[in-house]
Image (spheres, rainbow, N blue to C red):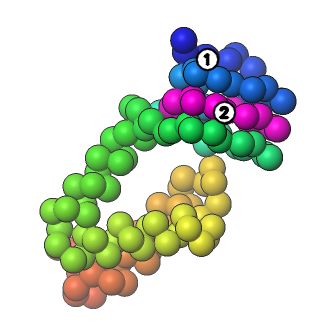
Amino acid sequence: MVVAESQRTIVGEHFKDLTIRIDGKHYINCTFERCRMEYAGGPPPVFDNCTLIDSGWWFDESAGNTIVFLQSMFNTFGQGGKDMVMQMLRFVFNNEVAPGTAHSNSQMIHQDMSLTRSGSPDDKR
């Protein structure tokens, strides 16, 4: 069963054995048990005081393409590609990139990566 709630805020629900599209939703005090959480790259979901039990993530559509892109960068551009992907993940782990600000995220990541590539920042290779 796939759950596609039309409401944007879900409070106090216990989801069990479901596939749930989470784009653009705000979950408050919810539990996800043995659920497949699908994210397609739409508006980021928000989770406040929620619990995951034996659940997993699935990245579909644009979000899936982003994962494939990161895998490609990591695996085909040698150490420079690995460094670029790891730098982006440090932004995520350190909460330096605010959720829901895609434009500022790409500017921040682009600016930092331009400092680590070979050549000057103005070099248009």
Residue at 37% over, 84% down: 115
Q: Depth-wise, is mark 2 or mark 1 nearer the camera?
A: 2
| Quadrant position of residue 71 | bottom left
The secondary element bearing badge 1 is classed as loop
Q: Amino acid at mark 1?
A: Ala
Q: Nearer the viewer, residue 90 or 31?
A: 31
> Is residue 25 magenta-colored?
yes
Residue 32's label in the rendered image is 2
Q: Quadrant of the N terminus?
A: top right
Q: Position of residue 31 (x, y in %)?
A: 73, 34
Q: Which residues are magenta?
A: 24-38
57 w.r.t. 115: above or below: above
Q: Residue 3 lies in magenta, yes or no?
A: no
Decide which of 5, 32 is in the foreground and name it: 32
Magenta residues: mostly which secondary structure?
strand
Q: Which residue is mark 1?
A: 4
Mark 2 surroundings within 10 Å by alpha-carbon count, few (fewer than 14), some (14 through 19), many (20 or more): many
- Screen quadrant of the C terminus: bottom left
Q: CA distance from mark 2 to mark 1?
A: 14 Å
Q: Position of residue 50 (x, y in %)?
A: 75, 42
- Residue 100: percent from left, percent from top: 63, 50
On the question of residue 24 being in view, the answer is no
